[in-house]
């Protein structure tokens, strides 16, 4: 994967090749997308603009079929934010970046598939992540493009108060007219993720007979198609449709069951009921059901005192009352990309906090540098307008010439090349790296994290090249320092981050103790019996972790076993008041260090990405640190993208 810029400037985004190939193969003729689209009738789909663009380029036949379905009312295609960011989080960091993200998304989808003739615009908020500010911003952006539009947001029924998911509602937001359509969580998730078609059919019949909404198309919306990336799902969907289509009979009565795209029909009325919506997200976020606690039978989940809004993406719990925000621990099954062995992992979420800080620092610098330097090179058009309209170039590379005519410059001169470097830097860092996926996963060591970090590295290189070309020493120095500190010296830069947040170490130990005891190991007795040595602590920790978190045939990953947790409790048992806090501190550092390591390297993942791209940096003190010997690749293992 690479991005070409005039005059031979090219940034190779390492660490994405194999997974990208797998993903592209899904879109090619004969791939899963052909089957998905062939079965898209009567369904409502959200499709990221970038996916739509790739589909048009890689599989035009499938793209045309999808377009025809939409034009003839057989399916509905809704925009979602351009690069799948969690909008409530993005808007907190940058009102402007969030506006650009939605603006690009809506313009690209409208251009590819046409504007809605009835003025109703339906938009899927990523992971149903809602805030009043985000809803108001989406409405303003859409109405800037389509002034007379009615904006409908697609959310989850659990987020509304006293709502009927069979019909839209009007949101109570001062200064904005926003509507919302609620997906039925139960039906949507069963349809997308349940492997038993007969069970789903019987459950739908039962619910419809009980008077639940019979509009299946309206209830099966948005992310549900994400569970369909497998050939076996096509027949599954068809069987369900055929099994409930027409009428459902119950106790002598019949109930009509219709599959209908959510925006079709006369059920969108003017006198809609009003409702309010809870801030946050209720889709694929951590819930109280996933909390691990003593006696909890589940194998996976999180270890925390509570789960706050959007904690999956922030890495922090709610921090209710006066208690400071905490990180949490994740317990999950993981496949080693090298040995292919399956393991249970126990990992702290602090890496998510560090990743977000890193990304936010870079996007802030890039945004300010782009706006400043576009003015400095003499482009009269306001930089904000240029960035908003850059979607035209993303949609069609041949539009670059027409686009820069507005700037009053020639594509062949140095000014045009510098402008392209700056605009591409903004696209990479502030739009395409700002995706939800990296912090969605439990593990830092995934392809999406590599991709996002590679985009961040590439954007800083572009800014450095542009600032060097125009002799802007201030931006060049700041860019060089940021690349070095955040990527190459990541471990140093963030070495004290663990001190800033609380960590539920006591809770981790309690779960370890309770679970181990239920399986025959009394930790309290072991701590008192075994001499307080490192070897003794390691032996106890390995046994306790395996009993507490290991599963049949799935052992705990050895590197995740924290011996300092045991040494801390040993010191407390022996009333070693000075040593106990030191071991507690060391146990937290141990958790932090293991959370940022690659499965195949002692170097942390940001450092590996920084070294891979350093050779492109136009400053000797950075480029000299380039290490071509850092091996990397990505691969799909068990349906997940792993980096190594």
Image (cartoon, rainbow, N blue to C red):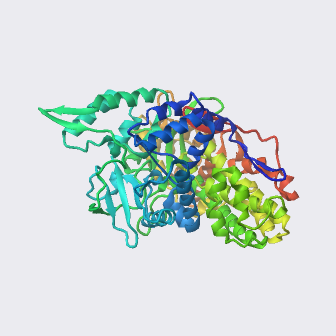
Tell me where residue 588 appears, x and y as whole percent.
58, 54
Task: Specify whether residue 41 is in view.
Answer: yes
Quadrant of the rendering where the C terminus is positioned: top right
Q: Quadrant of the N terminus?
A: top right
106 up-or-down from 332: above or below? below
* Place of residue 336 in the rendered image (x, y in percent of width and height, measured from the top left): 61, 34
Residue closest to the eye, 493 or 556? 493
Residue 533 image point, x, y percent = 61, 44
The tally of labels here is 0
Residue for point 63% across, 56% down: 392
Q: Quadrant of residue 377?
A: bottom right
Apparent side of residue 180 relative to residue 554 in the rendered image (left or right): left
Between 424 and 310, the one lying in front of the other is 424
Furthest toward the left, the residue is: 252
- Residue under the image location 27 percent in, 56 percent down: 163
Q: Is residue 8 left or right of residue 95?
A: right
Is residue 567 at least partly visible in the picture?
no
Q: Position of residue 363 (x, y in %)?
A: 65, 62
Nearer the observer, 116 or 324: 116
């Amino acid at each position: 994967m690479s991005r070409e810029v005039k005059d031979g400037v090219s940034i190779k985004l390492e660490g994405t090749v194999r997974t990208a190939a797998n993903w592209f193969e899904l879109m090619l003729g004969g791939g899963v997308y052909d089957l998905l689209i062939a079965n898209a009738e009567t369904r409502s789909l959200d499709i990221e603009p970038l996916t739509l663009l790739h589909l048009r380029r890689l599989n035009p036949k499938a793209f045309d079929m999808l377009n025809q379905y939409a034009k003839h009312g057989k399916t509905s295609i809704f925009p979602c934010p351009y690069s799948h960011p969690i909008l409530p989080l993005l808007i907190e960091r940058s009102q402007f970046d969030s506006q650009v993200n939605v603006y690009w998304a809506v313009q690209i989808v409208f251009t590819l598939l046409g504007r809605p003739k009835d003025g109703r615009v339906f938009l899927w908020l990523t992971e149903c992540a809602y805030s009043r500010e985000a809803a108001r911003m989406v409405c303003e952006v859409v109405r800037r493009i389509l002034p007379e539009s009615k904006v409908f947001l697609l959310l989850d029924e659990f987020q509304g108060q006293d709502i009927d998911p069979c019909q839209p509602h009007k949101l109570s937001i001062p200064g904005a007219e926003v509507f919302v359509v609620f997906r039925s969580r139960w039906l949507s998730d069963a349809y997308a993720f349940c492997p038993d078609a007969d069970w789903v059919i019987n459950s739908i019949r039962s619910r419809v007979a009980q008077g639940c909404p019979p509009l299946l198309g309206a209830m099966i919306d948005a992310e549900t198609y994400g569970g369909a990336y497998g050939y076996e799902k096509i027949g599954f969907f068809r069987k369900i449709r055929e099994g409930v289509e027409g009428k459902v009979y119950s106790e002598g009565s019949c109930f009509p069951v219709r599959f209908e795209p959510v925006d079709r029909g006369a059920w969108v009325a003017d006198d809609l009921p009003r409702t309010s919506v809870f801030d946050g997200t209720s889709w694929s976020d951590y819930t109280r059901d996933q909390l691990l606690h003593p006696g909890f039978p589940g194998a996976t989940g999180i270890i925390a005192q509570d789960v706050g809004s959007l904690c999956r993406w922030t890495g922090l719990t709610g921090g209710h009352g006066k208690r400071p925000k905490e990180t949490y621990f994740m317990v999950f099954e993981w496949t080693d990309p090298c040995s292919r062995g399956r393991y249970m992992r126990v990992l702290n979420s602090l890496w998510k906090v560090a990743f977000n800080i890193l990304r936010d620092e870079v996007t802030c610098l890039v945004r300010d540098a782009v706006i400043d330097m576009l003015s400095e090179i003499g482009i009269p058009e306001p930089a904000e307008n240029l960035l908003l309209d850059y979607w035209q170039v993303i949609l069609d590379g041949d539009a670059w010439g027409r686009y820069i005519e507005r700037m009053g410059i020639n594509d062949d001169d140095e000014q045009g090349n510098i402008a392209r470097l700056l605009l591409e830097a903004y696209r990479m860092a502030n739009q395409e790296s700002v995706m939800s996926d990296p912090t969605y996963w439990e593990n830092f060591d995934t392809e999406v994290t590599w991709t996002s970090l590679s985009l961040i590295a590439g954007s800083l290189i572009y800014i450095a090249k542009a600032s060097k070309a125009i002799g802007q020493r201030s931006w060049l120095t700041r860019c060089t320092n940021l690349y070095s500190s955040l990527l190459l010296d990541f471990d140093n830069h963030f070495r004290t981050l663990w001190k800033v947040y609380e960590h539920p170490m006591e809770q981790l130990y309690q779960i370890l103790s309770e679970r181990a005891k239920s399986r025959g190991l009394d930790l309290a007795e072991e701590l008192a019996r075994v001499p307080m040595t490192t070897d003794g602590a390691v032996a106890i920790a390995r046994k306790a972790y395996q009993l507490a978190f290991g599963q049949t045939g799935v052992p705990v990953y050895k590197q995740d076993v924290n011996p300092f947790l045991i040494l801390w409790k040993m010191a407390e048992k022996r009333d070693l008041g000075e040593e106990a806090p030191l071991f507690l501190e060391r146990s937290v550092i141990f958790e932090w260090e293991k959370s940022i390591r690659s499965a195949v390297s002692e170097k942390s993942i940001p450092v590996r990405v920084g070294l891979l791209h350093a050779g492109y940096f136009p400053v000797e003190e950075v480029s000299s640190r380039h290490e071509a010997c850092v091996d990397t690749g990505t691969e799909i293992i068990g349906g997940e993208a792993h980096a190594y």
